[in-house]
Image: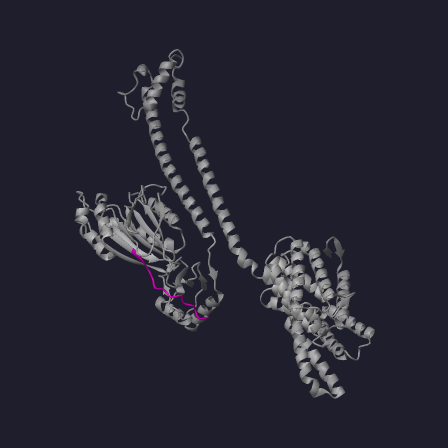
Amino acid sequence: MFRIKGLKLSNNSLMILSFLSAMASGFFLSGANIAGVASFADISLAGALGVVTSPAVLAGSLLRCIVDGTVGKNIVKIIAMIIIVITKLFSDIGNRTKACGFFTAFGIFVSGMLISAVLGEFFYKLLFYLFYSVLSGLTAYSASLVIMSLKKQFVIELSGKSGCAYALVYIVFMSALCGIEIYSLNIGMMIGTAVTLLASYYYGHTGGALCGALTSCGAFLASSDAGMTVVLLPVAGLMTGYIHRQRTGVSVVAFVSLSFMLMVLTGITKNNIGIMLNIVSGAVLFAVIAPCYSDKWVSTGTDSGTALPDIINARMSFLSDSIGTVRAESGKIAEVLAENSKDVDGVSRISSKICSNCYRNDLCWGSEKAVTQKAFAKLSRQPEITYETFPYELQNCLKKEELIKKFAKASRERMTARILRLRSSGNQQLLSEQIKITEEIIRSVGERIDVRYSEPISRLVTKKLSRYGIVPKKVIAYYNIYNRLIIELYFITAESPASTSRICDLISDELEMSLDITSPAYSGREMRFRLFEQPQYAMEVYGASMCAKGSDENGDTSTVFTDGTGIGYVILSDGMGSGKSASLESKLVVKMFRKLINSGVGCTSAIKLINSIMVAKSGDESFATLDAVRIDLDSCGLTVIKSGASATLIRHRGNILKVTSPTFPIGIYEQSDVFTSRYSFEDGDMIVMFSDGIDESQYKSIKELLLGGDDVKKIVCEICEKAESFNPSVRSDDVTVIGIRVRKRERQQSVPSV
């Protein structure tokens, strides 16, 4: 049983309706012409339909030939459809698309050869029927593909192979419809106008131009006169598409007005009234069907590509907010549980248990109640209870020993509970901070990236690597907002290539452009490389370090890297104290920060996550500073990031800026303390970073060095050599100095060869 808008149809009724529709289609299509000869639209329809409806097309076509008296003229078509119907009845091809196309072409070719042989025109007509059969078979294959797609998905899929099939079927059947006229109205032109206007309204200038071109093609196949009436349809659809998604009335007026103006400008004078009548009729038809249209039934293939990032962004943002709500609610629950876990009145509990069996109970808690309560309160406040500290108010108490034991036990329980609450509070703060970090990471991952994906280069790189036995799991090539090419290669970790330089050379040679490659970034199961065109700016980085007196290992750790997207990082961490233990702490911080950044985590979230790990990793006191410089090498944007680090000096346009931050090092508190700030920066500017081995009172001398020249290496070495005078404190410390200078590359814009 089927239901169509409230109308119930049984299987028999549906079969009868399908049979009558197919018969009517065969009747109307039988009289159509294409390129001056009888159209093969009815034959292709018979070949595409099933066993029940295929004979209906034959019946309708035969009825039309009898009515028009053209049975002899169309004998080839009739015999071809008889062969197709018989083949479907006595074989199991069903609705298989390739079989439908093959047997349609076969039926026409055999029918044409038989009739040509009877008329003695065998060799003369052979090539014509071969061409005719191929076209009809291709149309039948496309129509069958369309029908099967609709049955399977209930969606008009206008992308890929299915989109090509729809285009071919539309052209062929549009050519047939353009041969049908009712009271000066050309049915094909009217429907083509409505479809073009519908496409321009919902899919913009691309949809309008494409459907207009397909309609014009179908009309020209019907006849040159029909084609001339719709020759300007693609232009009108294109221009109307630029104002799509307005009110339907606006689109109708714009389309009709543009069609009229184009017709006047091009000098088309033949049958102007008829052309405009068809255009207006098609526009009216569009206005009627437009409110009923829904993209639920049509897929263009580009919808997911444009909407998916927005969907992911919305879902990530929603998930982040949901986690934030859970964090807030968990804090409230913890407070409620803490209130409920507080000890009840210990004095009342102990007195009721011990004094209730004493014969002096009525006296102590009767006429002397105030004195007794005061004494019990003293006992509850004493951290350690002995006979010497026992309150004098209870000197006549008969159960001193029991009271001392009970209050001493209660004191120990209170102390234990207080310690547990403090630990629980610290754990709750740490957990809350970790959940907050998760919120920030999820939200940052969901942010839409402004890039242009390049499918041709992705495909080219994949083919190039596969020829050399290198098979990445995924290749993604795209251009950033500065039109610089970036290629991401993902490999299964166990199948990762041995040499990254070879991959870089292979791809550079294939694209005929110079590319650099990053160090591998690991996620556990996968490994990623990034190949990239060199950005506009480059960093000159020099560092110098010196161990503290009596230490054989520097507690400071630094690193320089780029993430492959055009962002350069310089990191400096100073571990607590000096020597091996300090070195381990700083190395841990730098290593984790670099891994998180390369994995796509933001700087602030990365520092917070590292802080959480440092706090939770052991019970020993351990911490390290983090001083980071982030430089956008495409735009020369500078961001300074600090967590307990010393001051940084920035030389910009002959001025020296000192950047300090009142933050704590990583690993001290559950809640991390991060300072981030952006600064103006350009070609030739310089940055100097220090560990805490430099006394801030000596920054004036260092400023003079910075203003005295551009040799970064010389400046860094001189500061490091004078570290002892720059730090006149009694306690010696490790010293690390890093200098950074940004310069502009002489970069030529290269175009990849695709």
Residue 342 in the image, given as x and y percentages of width and height: 41, 30
The answer to whether residue 680 shows anywhere in this view is yes
- Residue at the (36%, 43%) spot, across then down: 672
The region drawn magenta spans: 741-754
The answer to whether residue 103 shows anywhere in this view is no
Residue 243, above or below 497: above
Residue 504 in the image, given as x and y percentages of width and height: 37, 67
- Residue at the (44%, 58%) spot, across then down: 481
Residue 396, above or below 578: above
Residue 186 sits inside the magenta stretch: no
State the residue in front, 519 or 717.
717
Main SS category, magenta section? loop
State the residue in front, 692 or 346.
692
State the residue in front, 285 or 640.
285
Residue 749 sits inside the magenta stretch: yes
Residue 234, above or below 600: below
Residue 539 in the image, given as x and y percentages of width and height: 31, 58
Left-right relation of 29 to 619: right
- Residue at the (39%, 11%) spot, across then down: 367
